Image (cartoon, rainbow, N blue to C red):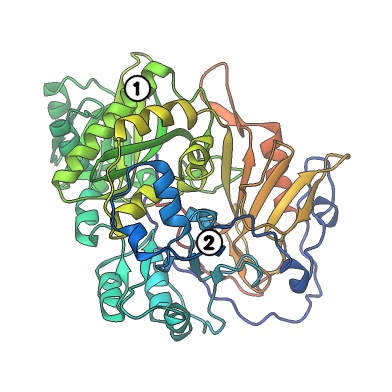
Amino acid sequence: MTEPPRRTATPRKRPAKTAAKTKAADAPTVENITAAQAVTPAPAADDMREVSVGTDAAFASSPSSASKRRPLRNISEIRHFFRTNDVPVYFIGATPFNLLGLDRWVRRFSYITYYDAWDGAHPRVFTPIHKPYQEFASGEEINNWLLRNPEVRAHMSRGVQPGVRPKVAMVFFDAETESICAELGYDLILPPAALREHLDSKIVTTKLGNEAGAPSVPNVLTKVNSYEELTAAAEKAGLGDELVVQTPYGDSGKTTFFISSEADWRKNSDYVVGEDIKVMRRINNRPVAVEAVLTRCGTVVGPFMTELTGYPELTPYRGGWCGNEMYPDVLSPERRAKATELVRRLGDRLSQEGYRGFFEVDVLVDVDTDEVYLGELNPRISGASAITNVTAGAYADVPLFLFHLLEYMGVEFELDVDEINERWEELAAADVWSQMIIKETSDIVELLEATPPTGQYYFDSTGALVFRRAALDWHQLQDESEAFFLRIYGPGDYRWKGADLGVLVTKGRLQRELAQGGSALTIRAGHLIDSMRASYRGTPLPEPATIEPAAGLKPL
């Protein structure tokens, strides 16, 4: 399932120390190649600046005022509107991961990030130079720090026409973010933080889904103080003996409890007693993620994806989200139609709450009965957006996030959402993309000395993963022999258990189905992971240090 934002602390980059006398051991790749053989060295910063932009949206001329007066009525007009846009739009975050590549479609769209994966070579990524040591407890704190930063404020005010308010989008935000944007004259193009907090509740999602005709797995909403009360409530609702209990807020991996005995109850009761809880029947389910945008014309539903969760090769967290896959057979045509209708019904109900824009839904498919259920609502931009924006459907029409932008750009539009959804059902699933988030899984704390560069990689004639060239995003990948790696922490930063090292995006699948049920990583996925890990070298800190994981990439 989709993780919510993890409340964490982020270590700041410190000046690089002198060369360590003791060299950290290199992790071998599948072929036991060394770190130097796994990935060739990064080019110099000056060389990396010679990057193909791969887009002409940034260079289109400004539109005349007359071109914005009539409502937009089709995809061609939407494309023209964004390719001639003259209002600055910024995505702000620790990294540009979630919406990387959207600048290909939207003129004057750019990124403001805390970490610079390109070391200054990306023409539309701005990172402040002066970043004194500071620990952050959340992604919201990182974004609020960026908004207040004088370098960022100067950058955002550059070239803004009188009367134009810059638009700001982000994954993590709160009431403080709203206050900062209001003071600085920025338009935060997202639903209100208070509404998002309300909708984040699994209890609220269940109630809204029931009202909309988008039911969850059979459940009962209640409060209990003992195992006897839990089993009595479950028996009355006909849920059986194997139960799944969820509390309203938080990471699904940490707020979901499987209880089928009194021993299970004793183990988890401290988290459950006295709380509003959702008690569900335990089913043999297949989780599927989908993103959608609620517009004034209806809900546009994106492609369905499976999730990579809990793989120890990628994450130290049991059940933790660590990637996505999109391929034609994620759902059968019948299940896809059911799931699409479920998401559209939920979107219609969210509109009554005043919500508009981007959201993500976890759909649960009961593999024994073929029923499709509402899982969880994630009312924000999510980590799955990275794949959604490069699908064949996106290139046939426009990326899904552009429908979100339409809602906040002050333009009138009239769209046939039924026709768009029908076309996306055919096109969006006719593509195969995968991504995985590579976290540090070892119980170490090290100062990084060498890291793989951001860019495009390929398998050479010996099967080794080799750095090919600098690249701005993953849109130009052609086949399974290529991959794009987005570096997060660079030399001089720290790595520790749970740290997000980087994101790898590739064509093709990274999971295989097991005969006994479930899934496992493919051999290719394992080779990619080992090769990237082998490119990191660090010096262990002389004394033990406690550093918490950084705010996740996916809201998570």
Neighbours of disc 1 within 10 Å: few (<14), some (14-19), many (20+): some
Q: Residue type at mark 1?
A: Ala
Residues at marks 2 and 1, CA–CA distance in whole angstroms: 38 Å
Residue closest to the eye, 62 or 93: 62
Q: Which mark, by number, is residue 60?
A: 2
Residue closest to the eye, 331 or 479: 479
Q: Which mark, by number, is residue 337?
A: 1
Q: Residue type at mark 2?
A: Ala
Q: Earlier in the sequence, mark 2 or mark 1?
A: 2
Q: Which mark, by number, is residue 556?
A: none
Residue depicted at 46% across the width and 66% down the height:
62
- Marks counted in the figure total 2
Neighbours of disc 2 within 10 Å: few (<14), some (14-19), many (20+): some
Q: Residue furthest right?
A: 462
Secondary structure of the residue carrying numbered label 1: helix
Residue closest to the eye, 172 or 429: 429
Q: Position of residue 450 (x, y in %)?
A: 74, 66
Foreground mark, 2 or 1, reads 2
The image quarter containing residue 262 is top left
Left or right: 383, with 532 as reference point: left
Q: Position of residue 45 (x, y in %)?
A: 74, 72
Left or right: 386, with 474 as reference point: left
Residue closest to the eye, 190 or 445: 190
